Amino acid sequence: GFLCQIAMPPKKGGKTNPAAAEAARAASGKKEVPVKKAVAKPVKKAVEKAEKAAKAVTKGAAIKRTRKIHTSVQFHRPHTLRVARNPKYPRTISQRSKFDEYRILRVPLTTESSMKLIEDNNTLSFLVDLRASKRNIRDAIKKMHKVKVASINTIIRPDGQKKAFVKLTSDHDALDVANKIGIL
């Protein structure tokens, strides 16, 4: 083991007579100041501490961890803290409906048969969104072209697109609406 030594300051002037030192102090008029003696800790504790430190240096102070025994093949992620989002500013602006009149009415048809329908039956024909109902188509026509609709017939073509035949009321002319759109 290690030996513990306490260093003491050397005495000045060698050995002195305590009675002579006391008489000299009394003659000078100085008060006697008690001298604290260095108290050594028990040597046994110091030796134990030193041995423990030496052992930690040689072997390493790491503590052995016990490993958990896994009884299942699958690994299940432990439940950790889930903090709710707390944004500094909103990431979305008010949601507007994406299924508006511009999405419903895609393109007007300009084929010869559709021109004949415009002239003879006062009927416009459009390619419309596949999800649009007759009520959606009626509202979109009313909003975009400001005309009243008498009836609507729809079909789904073999290529998968939906076609709508929009018959206007007698007080609105399909030729005028077609000119405004730019079909004729």
Image (tube, helix red, strand yellow):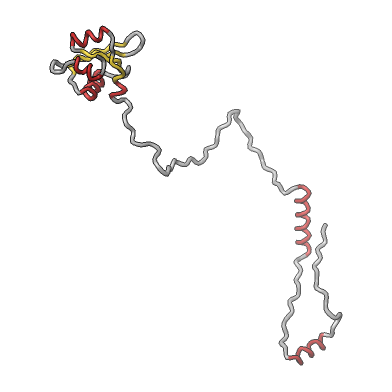
Quarter of the figure with residue 130: top left
Q: Is residue 59 above or below residue 127?
A: below
* Residue occupying the far left of the picture: 171
Quadrant housing the N terminus: bottom right
Q: Quadrant of the C terminus?
A: top left
Quarter of image, res 149: top left
Query: Percent x, y for residue 22?
Result: 78, 88
Q: Is residue 23 left or right of residue 182?
A: right
In the rendered view, does 49 fall on the left or right side of 87?
Answer: right
Question: At 69% from the left edge and 46% from the top edge, which residue is drawn?
Answer: 63
- Estimate the x, y position of residue 140 in percent, counting from the top left: 25, 22
Vertical comparison of 8 with 79: above or below: below
Position in image of residue 169 (x %, y %) = 15, 16
Q: In percent of the image, x 24 and y 13: which residue is there? A: 165
Seen at 83% across and 77% down, the residue is 11
Task: Find residue 129 and report its horizontal and vertical position in percent.
Answer: 32, 18
The residue closer to the viewer here, 162 or 58, is 162
| Left or right: 72 as drawn, with respect to 1 | left
Horizontal relation, residue 29 to residue 15: left or right: left
Query: In the rendered image of this protein, does residue 143 appear above or below residue 83?
Result: above
**Up/down of 146 relative to 65, above or below:** above
In terms of depth relative to the viewer, which is nearer, 67 or 136?
A: 136
Q: From the viewer's side, name the closer residue of 30 and 47.
A: 30
